[in-house]
Amino acid sequence: MHDADSGIDQHLLIPAPDMERLHNCSHHAPHDFYGWHAVEGGSVIRTRQPGAELVEILIHNELRAATPVGDDVWVLALPDIYTPDYRLQITWPEAGTIVSADPYAFLPTLGNLDIHLVSEGRHERLWDVLGANVRSYETALGTVTGTAFAVWAPNAIGVAVVGEFCVWNASQYPMRSLGSSGVWELFIPDVGAGAAYKFAVQTKEGHRRDKADPMAKAAQCPPETASVVVDSRYEWCDGEWLRNRSSADLLNEPMSIYEVHLGSWKIGKGYRDLTTELVDYVAEQGFTHVELMPVSEHPFGGSWGYQVSGYYAPTARWGSPDELRALIDEFHNRGIGVIVDWVPAHFPKDDWALARFDGPALYEHADWRRGEQKEWGTYVFDFGRNEVRNFLVANALYWIEEFHIDGLRVDAVASMLYLDYSREEGEWTPNQYGGRENLDAVQFLQEMNATVHRTHPGVLTIAEESTSWQGVTAPTEQGGLGFSLKWNMGWMNDTLEYFKLDPIHREHHHNEITFSMIYAYSEKYVLPFSHDEVVHGKGSLWGRMPGDDWNKAAGLRALYGYMFSHPGKNLLFMGQEFGQTGEWDEAHSVDWSNLEGWGHEYHEGIQKLVRDIHQVYRSSPALYSQDHTYEGFQWVKGDDAANNILAYLRWGADDSALLAVVNLSGSSQESYPLGTPRAGEWELVLNTDAAEYQGAGNDLPAVVSTDASGWDGFEHKLTLHVPANSVQWYRHRRNS
């Protein structure tokens, strides 16, 4: 039989039911009909080209005209059973004639091993096979370059690639389903870097939902929501840094982290500007690391990046992915490590992103009692699902391998660990043992940490975990979560509560400033004064210090002198290094004006102190080489509540010693006795009260010596002048 209008045999046409499904983006196997196929008596090539004036096919060095058969499908019948490579030559009303390879002439871009690993949740380079990847293939008619698109959507009845290259027409590029894997795939020639696209997902309920690519490596700048094809050509220059990192003992090295929100360090500056300005500043101030608040794409700027829509896409707000690579590269070239905040706990409900991706719950847990975080209005990942765990673990590896980051600070870990986190009775379900622990999340965190540390020695994972969960930094083989470090939220809260008190009241709260040493070695800690402490009405650290401006400046200087001598690594949020007076607002730059005009000398003094603290800190193994062991700390005076004085020794792994004397009262002590286990000379290496920092400038001796009278059970004694509201560090001279 023949088609009455075209004269084409019926067996060469696409059956009507399949044609309808293809047209409605609800077919699982478009490659069964489009492209070349052997048929009785020869073969046939079919292609769908909506709006084309003419479709010709170049085959055997000859152009042959295809016949339109309805619904924009063109057919060419061939007497040959085997057809070699061919090209489509399409004439459009306005665009003219275009020659292209046929998307439906290519084998699947995922192999059997890829499909197996995806299904098992063990594909450690998931971004190479899912998402949009520019590829080239050698064919008989030459090289074909295009983009391989693939997406996991197991509940969909059809998926198509849509974009500006097909006028967002969902019937132009339907994808094929790769068996039971839930993966849909299509290679489209001539689509390359810069192309905007989405996946048109047809749900079982009959709805079409145009979704951003979960694995997109770039996205349009918000408020636009399409994904963007990228093909990085960046050439890294940090090989020596990476080699040194892999063999470094980072937990016993100096670590001072500068936390930065890139968009508001200086408003209007992008990755390219920051490559010079921010890198220079961090290096000048002496920080060892920078921590970037989440740089993954996010729809709402006011979330600061903590509600992520594109886990594999650096936000386009500040530049291209390769410009971010250049920023990280330059940090490495200046000897500065880069930590990135990572948010695997939850994601926003925007309809065009991950939420209900292919109809029902997919990335999120299906039970709202586990799948929603009402406090934040977000969905919670289904950590028990293989493919979801794979998506997140591979994402951690992606940032390490593709952007050379040196650490992941994992946000909101407590919300992942507890099933009843921020939930009322009846809003959560216990685990299989009746407990409140989210065992799936525990397994995920252990897998992520173990995988990162196995594949990338020297890369840090840092938990922002606010509870007393045991073993956050214990190795996974010992049942711990496996993080390298944990934020010490208890120390931060107790310290700030104490420092905001007027010194006259502090003697009644002495236990708040000494309590941290009770648990200082229960985990490996970072001491954080983060962005969370200077937003939502909390004001600035400057504003929390009691008294007038002189006393506020003195209080901040003492706070930093105490912080950097306390066991643990250190973190300051941008602006704190000079005592920013205002609360942080992501819509405005850091208050650089504090360094100008009236009162600028106080802020310049704090800024200089932080620079000098870093210089002494980084040259003093006693302050960092035994942060996580009892051998690194010894009380000298911890019980003088009446005078608000603390004194303690920090011991280095090289047996060096540094004495920190902390006077948090409003009164100076001109002849204060302190015992010490070591005789000889102690050199003053830091004084937060020095005139160069806008302190009182008391004339303290550069070197003090012990006498043999002993004190407080120690064999030797020092007698010191201890100025009010200040900290002094004394380094022991070994050969004295």
Image: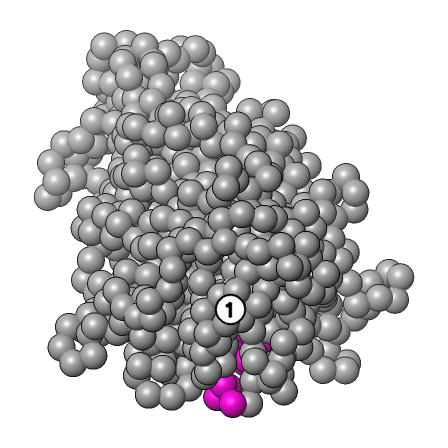
Residue found 59% across the figure and 39% down from its top: 655
Magenta-drawn segment: 494-504
> Is the image coloured rainbow, by chain, by secondary structure, or in one colour?
one colour
Q: Is residue 426 visible?
A: yes
The one of 152 and 298 positioned closer to us in this rendering: 298
* Count of number-bearing discs: 1
The one of 330 and 601 positioned closer to us in this rendering: 601
Is 703 positioned to the left or the right of 268 in the image?
A: right
Q: Where's residue 549, x and y in %?
A: 30, 83
Q: Where's residue 521, x and y in %?
A: 69, 55
Residue found 34% across the figure and 14% down from its top: 138
Image quarter (top left, top right, bottom left or bottom right) of the N terminus: top left
Q: Quadrant of residue 172?
A: top left
Residue denoted by label 1: 662
Please say if 472 is above or below 6. below
Q: Is residue 577 visible?
A: no
Is 256 positioned to the left or the right of 660 in the image?
A: left
Residue 718 located within the stretch drawn in magenta: no
Residue found 60% across the figure and 25% down from its top: 112
Residue found 20% across the figure and 27% down from its top: 99
Residue kind at label 1, given as amino acid type: Val
Residue 499 located within the stretch drawn in magenta: yes
Q: Where's residue 74, x and y in %?
A: 32, 34
The one of 44 and 47 positioned closer to us in this rendering: 47
Is 307 positioned to the left or the right of 324 in the image?
A: right
Is label 1 in a helix, a strand or a loop? strand
Please say if 450 is above or below 103. below
Q: Residues within 10 Å of mark 1 (few under 14, many from 20)?
A: many
- Helix, strand or loop: magenta stretch: helix
